[in-house]
């Protein structure tokens, strides 16, 4: 798997299509700091350099159980959280997946190029199908094909995601490669773009990923300061400091997770606590205090912006409608090309 770390925009006189970025977030719950560290933070940087498409992937979200009445609000909340956290709807194309029906059409066409065996080997599919209480639906299996369609529809090259999604990006490369070979050069091969802290673990259970759908596992982007402090204080660490000379590489998952978060949110305090760990003199309570202060400070403006935005749902709807209007012509152009190549016209 090729992981892109430092892509540059296409040089002048280079390829006709600009380097595009695509990524998505599911409206499955409250957007959390894991989503921010693994995805949104990077999206906000990339949008300044590249033509960027960020999508509220509602069609993915409905592969899990969800509350129909609540769902439209979840979509708006996810969009508001993204805008509050730095996605500029004037710079990026921020839209809802189901508002651009070409996603589903391309998914169907890509389905015919995707071996079932490869889908069955996807880690996320295996985990989610194991947890499925009422049978495994085809949507769960085909989830990564829809993801491939999301990205390929915009001929995106860069896919900024958390580590959990790398396998899916690898699959979309395979699908794109197969399409290009069979029907002619059409899609650039997408590359996952990871940042440090691409996998934030749950504070209360560092063996599991911080997840929207697991209550208690996450700190919301817009969580109130007291609750953030409480959750960080309660984060799982070790009963006491390690032996002198211990290496951070060997730290327990809970301690390693706190160091990852410290490096992201309070990089200026990292060396000091890393040294204390090495010397066997670390006080986790002090480290947690420093981390909680930094998280509270980082998200204070996000929380304020979010509070203002959710007061104006029509504004969020307008942003999303505008995003779909910009995304659709790009999607339609790709579909015309794909239909022709596949002999469907
Ligand atoms: N814990 C995490 N650490 C780092 N990055 C993460 N992402 C998710 N969790 C973490 C990244 O956030 C982006 C959007 O995720 P998603 O909404 O598409 O779905 P997900 O990965 O399944 O996220 P959740 O929060 O765990 O949701 P549920 O509980 O619904 O499954 C992705 O780029 C993802 O890598």
Image: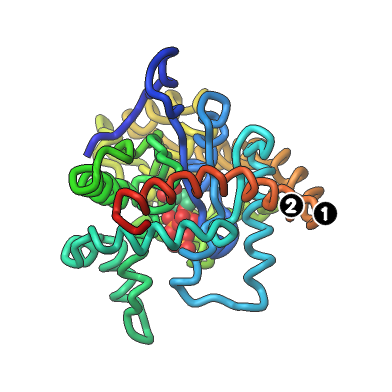
Q: Mark 2 sits on what residue? A: 316
Figure disc tally: 2
How far apart marks 2 and 1 lie (CA) works out to: 7 Å
Callout 2: CB less than 8 Å from ligand 1:
no
Looking at the rendered image, the quarter that the N terminus falls into is top left
Q: Nearer the viewer, residue 134 or 112?
A: 112
Which type of secondary structure does the marked residue at label 1 adopt? Answer: loop
Residues under numbered marks 2 and 1 in contact, where contact means CB atoms less than 8 Å apart = yes
The disc label shown at residue 170, or none: none
* Whole-percent x, y for residue 267 in the image: 50, 27
* Whole-percent x, y for residue 13 in the image: 41, 13
Up the image or down, 30 lies above or below 253; here it is below
Up the image or down, 82 lies above or below 140; here it is above
Q: Nearer the viewer, residue 280 or 32?
A: 32
* Residue occupying the far left of the picture: 117
- Quadrant of the image where one finds ligand 1: bottom left
Q: Mark 1 sits on what residue? A: 312
Up the image or down, 86 lies above or below 170; here it is above
* Whole-percent x, y for residue 102 in the image: 48, 57
The residue at 37%/84% (across/down) is 133
The residue at 50%/49% (across/down) is 332
Q: Nearer the viewer, residue 29 or 268?
A: 29
Which class describes the residues within 10 Å of circle 1: few (<14), some (14-19), or many (20+)? few
């Amino acid at each position: 798997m090729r992981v892109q770390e430092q892509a540059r925009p296409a040089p002048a006189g280079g390829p006709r299509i600009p380097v595009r970025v695509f990524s998505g977030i599911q409206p499955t719950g409250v957007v959390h700091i894991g989503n921010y560290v693994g995805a949104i933070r990077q999206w906000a940087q990339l949008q300044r350099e590249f033509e960027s498409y960020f999508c509220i992937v509602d069609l993915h979200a409905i592969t899990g159980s969800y509350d129909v009445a609540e769902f439209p609000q979840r979509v708006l909340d996810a969009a508001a959280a993204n805008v509050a956290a730095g996605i500029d709807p004037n710079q990026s194309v921020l839209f809802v997946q189901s508002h651009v029906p070409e996603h589903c059409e391309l998914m169907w066409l890509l389905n015919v190029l995707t071996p079932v065996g490869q889908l069955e080997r996807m880690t996320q599919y295996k985990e989610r199908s194991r947890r499925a209480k009422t049978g495994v639906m085809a949507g769960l299996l085909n989830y990564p094909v829809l993801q491939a369609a999301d990205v390929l529809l915009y001929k995106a090259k860069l896919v900024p995601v958390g580590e959990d999604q790398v396998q899916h990006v690898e699959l979309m490369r395979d699908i794109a490669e197969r399409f290009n070979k069979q029907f002619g050069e059409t899609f650039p091969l997408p590359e996952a773009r990871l940042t440090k802290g691409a996998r934030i673990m749950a504070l209360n259970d560092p063996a599991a990923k911080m997840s929207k759908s697991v209550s208690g596992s996450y700190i919301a982007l817009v969580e109130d300061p007291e609750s953030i402090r409480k959750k960080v204080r309660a984060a799982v660490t070790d009963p006491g400091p390690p032996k002198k000379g211990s290496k951070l590489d060997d730290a327990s998952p809970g301690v390693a997770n706190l160091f990852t978060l410290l490096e992201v949110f309070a990089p200026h305090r990292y060396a000091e606590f890393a040294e204390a760990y090495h010397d066997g003199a670390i006080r986790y309570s002090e480290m947690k205090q420093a981390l909680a202060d930094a998280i509270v400070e980082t998200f204070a403006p996000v929380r304020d912006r979010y509070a203002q935005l959710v007061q104006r749902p029509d504004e969020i709807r307008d942003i999303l409608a505008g995003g779909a209007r910009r995304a659709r012509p790009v999607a339609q152009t790709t579909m015309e090309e794909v239909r022709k190549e596949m002999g469907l016209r």
